Amino acid sequence: MTPIKVLLADDQALLRSAFRVLVDSEPDMHVVGEAADGAEAVALARSTRADVVLMDIRMPGTDGLSATRTISADPELAGVRIVMLTTFEVDEYVLQSLRAGAAGFLGKGAEPEELLNAVRVAAAGDALLSPAATKGLIATFLAQDGGAEGAPDPAEYAERLSALTGREREVLVQVAGGHSNDRIAERLVVSPLTVKTHVNRAMAKLGARDRAQLVVIAYESGLVRPRAE
């Protein structure tokens, strides 16, 4: 199996070094480059064709958010998955990062195994959005004032949502809850492969880059609404 190519983007050299040692200690992944700012991260993503970028949100010059937008908008980098690194699990820029095309986010205080798992999950094309993280993210940014600046009008999604089958809508609701394909399969009493098929079809119909964007679309369209505890 070809090792997962990982690109590290963080302005703290010490943190990059720690991540490099951790990633390179695993037989199924290795670091192909290090960037100290967003502009360098974009350039290295293009030259190394990294599979996963561990991207710090806050960096001098071009920040992680801008870099994520640039990478996600480049058709030649469609296979690159970006995991945003944040100081807090629910960061003020996290929702914007997901809209920009990030596959998910991870707190900088995460355990080593969590970071390694994040790389593997992102490389596999899944979203790094646990039910708890999804709930906190959506409740904080969408329930308060309709989301951060740049959120599309829910009406823009109406036509695309109408193209979904009943089962695809059911699966989308489950995805919005942060559930894995296996968990959704259990809940809907179908096979994980069937769930994956529905997820892929929903992504195509809604123009979502990946699973993480499906979550954002589900809430911003009004298909799923945050519930206050």
Image (tube, helix red, strand yellow):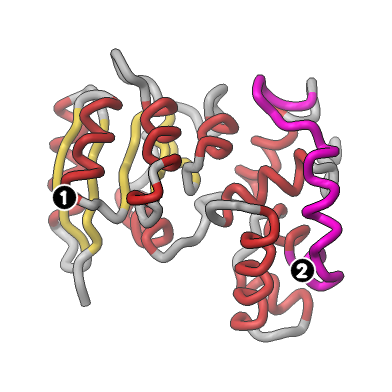
Residue at (21% x, 35% y) in the render: 43
Q: Position of residue 76 (x, y in %)?
A: 33, 51
As drawn, the label of residue 31 is 1
Q: Which residues are magenta?
A: 146-171
Residue 71 image-quadrant placement:
top left
Residue, disc 2? 168
Label 2: few (<14), some (14–19) or many (≥20) C-alpha neighbours in 10 Å: many
Q: Nearer the viewer, residue 155 or 41?
A: 155
**Is 164 colored magenta in this rendering?**
yes
In the image, taking residue 160 as reference, residue 112 lies left or right, namely left
Closer to the observer: label 2 or label 1? 2
Q: Residue furthest top?
A: 61
Q: Disc 2 marks which amino acid?
A: Glu
Mark 2 or mark 1: which comes first in sequence? 1
Q: Quadrant of the N terminus?
A: bottom left
Residue at (41% x, 65% y) in the render: 124
Q: Nearer the viewer, residue 137 or 202?
A: 202
Q: Identify the secondary structure beneath mark 2.
A: helix
Residue 79 image-quadrant placement:
bottom left
Q: Position of residue 36 (x, y in %)?
A: 20, 25
Q: Disc 1 marks which amino acid?
A: Val
In the image, taking residue 90 as reference, residue 202 lies left or right, namely right
Residue at (13% x, 36% y) in the render: 17
